[in-house]
Every structure is written in C-alpha cells, then in structure tokens.
Image: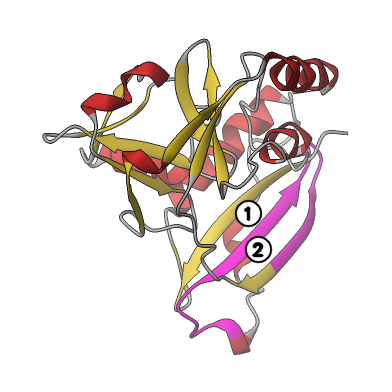
Amino acid sequence: MHRYVETICIERGHPLRLDYHRARLRATLAHEQSPHSEFDLSACLSLLPADLRYLDRVRCRVIYDASSIADVTFSPYTLRPISRLRCIEADHAAYPRKSADRSVLNALFALRSTADDVIIVRNGLLTDTTIANLALFDGRAWHTPSLPLLAGTHRAALLAGGVLVESDIPANGLSRFSRLRLFNSMIRWGEIDLPTDCIRFHSPTSLVDQTTSELKKTPS
C-alpha cells in the first residue's frame, strides 16, 4: 500500500499551517479512495515530547496510508545551507502527492554535481527543487511556478495571502528575475534568498536520458 507523509513545522510548541496540511491529507485520502475522510493530525501533534516543546523549530513527520497512520516522529530542525543550484531537465518527473517514496527526487538530486540542490525543469518550465518550492522576484512581484512538482502547504498559504503570484517561468527566461527564494513547510519565507546567478544549467543528453529512463520505471 502506498505511503504518504505530512511534514509539519512546530515553532515553540505551535504547529504552523495545520489547516493546509489537513486539506492535503484529505485530498490524498480521497485520491486513494480511502474509507477514511481524514485522520486526526491534532492527536498526532499531542505526542510532541516535553523536551522539544520550547525549541525554535521541530519537524513532525506523520506517515500514513489509505487505512491508517503508520508512524509519527519528532526531531529538532536545522536548516541546510543552500547557495548553488543546478537546473536539470526531467520532463517525465512526477511527484503530485507527498509520497514517502522519494526515489524520483533522489535520482535527480544525485545529478547536482557541485551544487547544493537541483531545480527540476519540465517541458522547459521551472518547477521545484528536490526539497522546496521556489519563487523568483522581477522587481515588482514574487512569481512561483504555476505547475510545481508538488504544491506545498507553505506555497498555498503564501498564495492565499497574496505574497506570491503563479506564473509559467521558462528556464531560458531567468534574466528578467533578480532574486530567488526557496521555501517549504520547514523553511521560512525569506530564509533562503539568493541571487539568480547562483543557478547553473546542466543537460547533457546522456544524463538526462538516464534520469528520465529511471523516472519512467518509478511509480508516481
């Protein structure tokens, strides 16, 4: 049975964007035709150990399938530094729901070379990195890809708050943007803010063909 994960950020005992996590969980259960319409994330969060309740950031991982919650874990969070990114073409990459199986993303991450992560390009358009949604600043507004690999909960909240606008962002159109930000459920908005010249391009046919071949074999 396919397993999924919700990664919830807890700041000093307070879970962030819980309604967005609930909405995604409900959508995933509906996709799986689960007999359950929802699982109780609040009950999962109540298991937070006392020694973690006052930390600045704690990662709660809730792993579940169509029938039940399989595991709940908590761990202190430390931001991984990112300063260099590499664009990788992967037209067949698919990760529409937050699956516990990250083999698609891991295969692409392995192509990062000297970069810290990759930006996945599908059909000429930017999507996400392997760990985060992204946004680009054109001097007036922050634009996030309209077709992300995974529509994250933090992304949904920023869109609802008017912080972001959705746009098709061609990989060959980066010159109109000056800044790039990465964000996910754990990474705060503005915490990773980089000049767009941190992005490098990489698309040797042999590596792209190898990657897409592996992706075709991987269930989405």
Q: Closer to the camera, 216 or 172? A: 172
| Magenta part of the chain | 52-73
Which residue type carries mark 2?
Answer: Cys
Which mark, residue 44? 2
Identify the secondary structure beneath mark 2. Answer: helix
- Compared with 191, 146 (above or below) is above
Identify the secondary structure beneath mark 1. Answer: loop
- Compared with 105, 203 (above or below) is above
Measured as percent of width and height from the top left, residue 12 is found at 44, 79
Q: Are marks 2 and 1 in contact (CB under 8 Å)?
A: yes
Crowd rating for badge 1 (residues with CA inside 10 Å; few <14, some 14–19, many 20+) = few
Measured as percent of width and height from the top left, residue 22 is found at 53, 45
In the rendered image, residue 72 lying in the magenta stretch gets the answer yes
Which residue type carries mark 1?
Answer: Asp
Which mark, residue 58? none
Residue that label 1 marks? 40
Measured as percent of width and height from the top left, residue 203 is found at 60, 20
For the point 48% across and 85% down, the residue is 54
- Does any portion of residue 156 appear in the rendered image? no
Q: Is residue 128 left or right of residue 34?
A: left
- Compared with 88, 133 (above or below) is below
